[in-house]
Amino acid sequence: MSEFVIKIEDEIVQVLGKQTIEKYLQAFITQSILKVAAGDILKDYDNESLNGDKIWLAAKKSAFLNDRYSQYIKVSANV
């Protein structure tokens, strides 16, 4: 495990609070880990060529047609 020391101005700590800053940093690290994992998954997705697999495409289409909220779902990778 690595340890990092982050220096933050006292005024900022007083305004935001130590717990708020700790929660923000933890959320930032968690999001960063998820972005890296999502990037790896997208690489695997592209490598597997699922976009050309007819069975996969049919299952994907069926899943979205059976979901009444599918028109509201828009997924974009921001990695």
Image (spheres, helix red, strand yellow):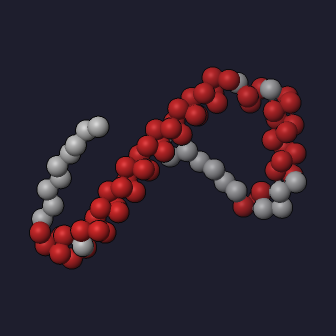
Quarter of the image where one finds residue 59: top right
Quarter of the image where one finds residue 61: top right
Provide residue 64's location: percent of width, then percent of height. 82, 50
Provide residue 32's location: percent of width, then percent of height. 41, 46
| Number of callouts | 0
* Residue positioned 22% across, 43% down in the render: 3
Residue farthest to the bottom?
15
Q: Compare residues 78 and 11 and report the one nearer the observer.
A: 11
Residue farthest to the front?
1
* Residue positioned 83% across, 47% down in the render: 63
Give the side of residue 45 with respect to residue 4, left or right. Answer: right
In this rendering, is residue 29 above or below 68?
above
* Residue positioned 78% across, 62% down in the render: 69
Give the side of residue 3 with respect to residue 63, left or right. Answer: left
Quarter of the image where one finds residue 77: top right
* Residue positioned 12% across, 65% down in the render: 9
Quadrant housing the N terminus: top left
